[in-house]
Image (cartoon, rainbow, N blue to C red):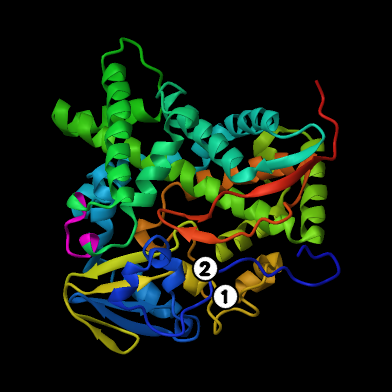
Amino acid sequence: MPTGSGLRFRPAMPTPLGRAMRLSDLLNPNIARNLMNAVPSAAYTEPYLRAQMLGLVFHGVSDPAAIRHVLSDNAGNYRRSRLVARMLRPLAREGLFTAEGKAWHSQRRLMAPAFLPHAIAAFTPLFDRAAEQSLDQLPDGRGVVDMAEVATRTTSAVIDEALFSGQSGMSFGETGRHVRDFVAGATQASFSLLVGLERFSPGAAQRRARRAQRVLTSRMGVFLRDRSVQADPPEDFVARLYRAFRAEHEAEEAMQLTLDNAMTFFIAGHETTAAGLTWALYLLSGDTQAQTWAREESQAAWAAGGGGEAVLERLPYLRMVWDETLRLYPPVHRIDREALADDEVCGHRVRKGETVTIWPWIVHRHRTLWDEPDLFNPENFDPEAKAGRHRYQFIPFGAGARMCVGMGFAQAEALILLSRWLAAHRFTPAPGHVVRPRSDFTLRPEGGLPLIVERVVARTA
């Protein structure tokens, strides 16, 4: 229930298993479709757990120092898990998300300038326009709205405009279902995936994922090839990306690398931010005091003028809310790294080929790292609390060299959208709806997030 009298809101989380996950659990659709339901209770109290399945060995690590060792200090000994790469390669192929070694370093170098602070600042007018347009999807009075859909539709439009000048033809209305079909089917745990036969899986979800992959890559490919022969294309992200790849690769290879990364950023760029926005509204709908403070701050920030870049500097409490949202529902909820040579973590030997698995979801709720970790408490991110925390205790976008390159973009976009929505509307839970977190590519509330949305400030013409 919502809180307003000093009681903290306890948001939804799956009930932990009282034992380690077994291979037979993959026959349980509630676990196969949502691995969050397979997290053992011991994971929230122990710094290290070991699991083995079909000859695959997983070392679950929650100790911040060990996480730093794997993701930073000894990162050269680890690569992205081949199991995860197989999930996403049909769509991302050799893009930044799945590339390794020199290929990854080259792509990261080419893309980093697009996400530097000055480049992000240039996007703030776009974020504001998208926020203003999204208000058309919200009632002028009071009504029930699926805010998960509003968030996804809005962030999809932002990515299309920011990266592709709004010309990709990959609008939410045309591609939203295909994106969800792909991420749901491609990331579903199955025997086929564990043994490397995911391309031949007969499951309905996997068949939908393969069909969605063909549709999405075909549409994006047509757009990119049309763009490559335009005499005077817009000077946007994808144009600069293709030009950079073309300077170092033959035309066909440059086009394929551009397609791989366009698909990566199109999906990851809006799915993760949309999920974060959805969870933020869910958490604020459950804590009326926090929502009131965030609304008052947002209203004052926009009333002071100066545009989106100036507004971002006036939202310290909303930033705390956003960070607390990412703690409870991190967009990168699982990180897997495969050892290239023997190593040691938490005093346990990791052999070459074994996987170290780090779940930000678990780290962010670990009983030894946080006070009352299952409660919504934005004060976890006030300056004093942050100063006393281990750097690798809060890793919503990963950590080390492979930290998400779009993190700053996502935060600026989310804060502008949230502040616009909160300044004009009140959000309360829809009666009878039970929120259940579901994991695939991101963490989402299963079945969307219907909320009662009530306008509190009259909209100007």
Distance of label 1 from label 2 (alpha carbons)? 8 Å
Q: Residue furthest top?
A: 231
The answer to whether any part of residue 66 appears in the image is yes
Q: Is residue 146 above or below residue 306?
A: below
Q: Residue furthest bottom?
A: 347
- Which mark is on residue 394? 2
Q: Main secondary structure of the magenta part?
A: helix
Q: Is residue 78 above or below residue 155?
A: below
Q: Over which residues does the magenta segment extend?
A: 192-199
> On the image, numbered disc 1 is attached to which residue?
389
Q: Residues within 10 Å of mark 2 (few under 14, many from 20)?
A: many
Q: Nearer the viewer, mark 1 or mark 2?
A: 2
Quarter of the figure that contains the C terminus? top right
Q: Position of residue 186 (x, y in %)?
A: 31, 51
The residue shown at (28%, 45%) is 207
Is residue 194 located in the magenta-colored stretch of the structure? yes
Q: Position of residue 424 (x, y in %)?
A: 79, 39
Q: Is residue 419 above or below residue 223?
A: below
- The answer to whether marks 1 and 2 mark residues whose Cβ atoms lie closer than 8 Å is yes
